[in-house]
Amino acid sequence: MRYDQLLVRYGELTLKSGNRNTFINQLKGNVKHALIPLTGYEVHANRDRMYIHLDEQIDVEEVIRRVSKVFGVHSVSPVMRVDKELETVKEAAIKVAADIDEEGKTFKIDVKRSDKSYPMETFELQQVLGGAVLSQAEHLTVNVKQPDYKLQVEIRRDAAYLYSRVIKGAGGLPVGTGGKTLLMLSGGIDSPVAGIEVMRRGVTIEAIHFHSPPFTSDEAKQKVIDLTHIMAETAGEIKLHLVPFTEIQKTIHKVVPENMTMTSTRRLMLRIAEQLAERIGAQAIVNGENLGQVASQTLGSMHAINAVTSMPILRPLLTLDKDDIILKAKEIGTFETSIKPFEDCCTIFTPKNPKTNPKLEKVEKFESKFNFDALIEEVIEHTEVMTISKVRETADFSDLL
Ligand code: ATP
Ligand code: MG
């Protein structure tokens, strides 16, 4: 069984008529990126659909797997293109039906005949092809009203196109069409999922990670790099900003009472994130916070922490249950890396009894005993920036895009 092309249907693109071309071009680029390093295909995008022509030797299932994960793709179907001669179309219909490898399913033949000069009428063709499939495919029966599978046959000017499988795509909007955000990326389970969730809505991310060597290890840093590699599978390259946070944490522990250090730590992270966001032209900050999950994520804590910035903070996981976040982390492939046991800067400096309802005025009063502005500036100067691409990349493919 050989398919010649993949039909890719757009998701919500249809809603955005003004920006349609931008969206389609971005999606085309993202699809090509997802297919690196495969060869033997050609992508053609028009206003309504995208077609990926496939060479004989390419692994079609692998192409389907990759393309269906790209945000902005509603669904994909592997399509067979054959000569319009009736016997050939019959044979192709039988082959496509044979590809439905489940017992006891129902089908119907759905013919679209845009080539009006074709010698057979739509209804007649449906009858003939249905009969041909039934005579060969013992595992199928016909159900015209509610079939499990529609065997689509399009008779166009140049050829006949047949398909039956419709594989659901990732949905959402193409990454790169919705502006830029800065993701606060820890080594935990939640923040990579939060990053992917905003990318699903078309938003590009850069990531910021705070580490505190020598209290945090090289393995902890590597874990964050690995997570960024995985996120880059969907997004193209991601810039990762690694902020040396040791001095700030030490200072916090000098000037702020222990039960408020957690609040101040988060506030300082956010102040640095805001400044970096402004420098890189990001319009919002994303984090993996989840209401009530830990002391720093109660409403009271969020209120005291959030007060340092007026920049929008996106919290895509705010109301999800942990089980659901874990499921998502497994789906996107970050879970196994996230659960590696390397401590991050927050775990190491965690106070025994962090305040769950810190008073903003008090935190502000303690923090004002030290001029953090200068330290923040210094820390940003010493931030290491890495450009991280997807794991499988083996060479420079930029000329393909
Ligand atoms: P995660 O699983 O993402 O680490 P968490 O449930 O462990 O989340 P916290 O550790 O309280 O929650 O962190 C809340 C959010 O703050 C994280 O989701 C992340 O966005 C941000 N954050 C925490 N630690 C760091 C860090 N070292 N660097 C960058 N961002 C961080
Ligand atoms: Mg964490």
Image (spheres, rainbow, N blue to C red):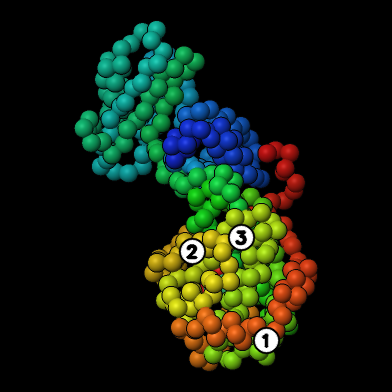
Does 166 appear above or below 186? above
Q: Which corner quadrant of the image does residue 380 belong to?
A: bottom right
Does 73 appear above or below 20? below
Q: Position of residue 199 (x, y in %)?
A: 54, 53
* Kind of residue at disc 1: Lys
Q: Position of residue 54 (x, y in %)?
A: 57, 33
Please report the residue visible at 56 percent of the width from the left and 51 percent of the height from the top.
203
Q: Secondary structure at mark 2?
A: loop
Residue 369's mark? 1
Where does the C terminus fall, quadrant-wise? Answer: top right
Q: CA distance from mark 1 to mark 2?
A: 31 Å
Can you tell which of label 1 and label 2 is closer to the viewer? 1
The answer to whether any part of residue 388 appears in the image is no
How crowded is the residue under tag 1: few (<14 C-alpha within 10 Å), some, or many (20+)? few
* Kind of residue at disc 2: Arg
Q: Position of residue 314 (x, y in %)?
A: 51, 61
Lower sequence index among marks 1 and 2: 2
Q: Ligand 1 falls in which quarter? A: bottom right
Give the residue pinned by disc 3.
182
* Kind of residue at disc 3: Leu
Residue 234's mark? none
Q: Is residue 350 left or right of residue 292?
A: right
Q: Position of residue 336 (x, y in %)?
A: 54, 69
Give the residue pinned by disc 2.
315
Q: Secondary structure at mark 3?
A: strand
Lower sequence index among marks 3 and 2: 3
Can you tell which of label 1 and label 3 is closer to the viewer? 1
Q: CA distance from mark 1 to mark 3?
A: 29 Å
Front residue (pair 357, 223): 357
Q: CA distance from mark 3 to mark 2?
A: 12 Å
How crowded is the residue under tag 2: few (<14 C-alpha within 10 Å), some, or many (20+)? some
